[in-house]
Image (cartoon, rainbow, N blue to C red):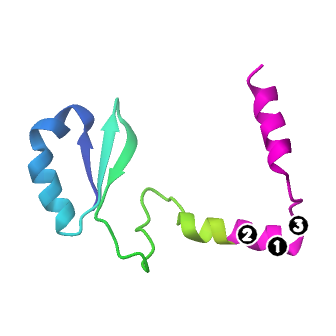
Amino acid sequence: MTQVVLVEDVPEKLEELLLKVSQGETLLIARHGREIAALGPVLDQNQDRPEVAGSRSSSSLIEKILQRRDSGAIARVSADEIRAWKSEGLR
């Protein structure tokens, strides 16, 4: 079971929490009853990150996006178009 730690408890328990993480545990940090972060072990680059609270592996998600882009399902966008969208969003 994943341990949930309150954000205000992290400073005084940091050493204990890091020991648990070094032993392979993943901890969830919560503020006002809402999980806001995960603290987990650093993994070998060849391994996927553990699933935390139903999250997807970012590497598999990126791979799916790249496959869709390369198949032509997603139109290519130029850097100038992205800059224009960004500028428009700042107005």
The residue beneath circle 1 is 70
For residue 7, above or below residue 52: above
Q: Specify which label sits upstream in the sequence, 2 or 3.
A: 2
Gap between marks 1 and 3, in whole Å? 8 Å
The reply, left or right, for residue 80 in relation to residue 29 is: right
The residue beneath circle 3 is 73
The reply, left or right, for residue 62 in relation to residue 19 is: right
Q: Residue at x 86, y 43 (%)?
A: 81
Where residue 23 appears, x then y in whole percent? 17, 69
Quadrant the C terminus occupies? top right
Q: Residues within 10 Å of mark 1 (few under 14, many from 20)?
A: few
Q: Residue furthest front?
A: 80
Q: Main secondary structure of the magenta part?
A: helix
Where residue 42 appears, x then y in whole percent? 31, 66
Q: Residue at x 80, y 48 (%)?
A: 79
The residue beneath circle 2 is 66
Q: Which residues are magenta?
A: 64-91
- Which of labels 1 and 3 is toward the front? 1
Local secondary structure at mark 3: loop
Name the foreground residue: 66 vs 19. 66
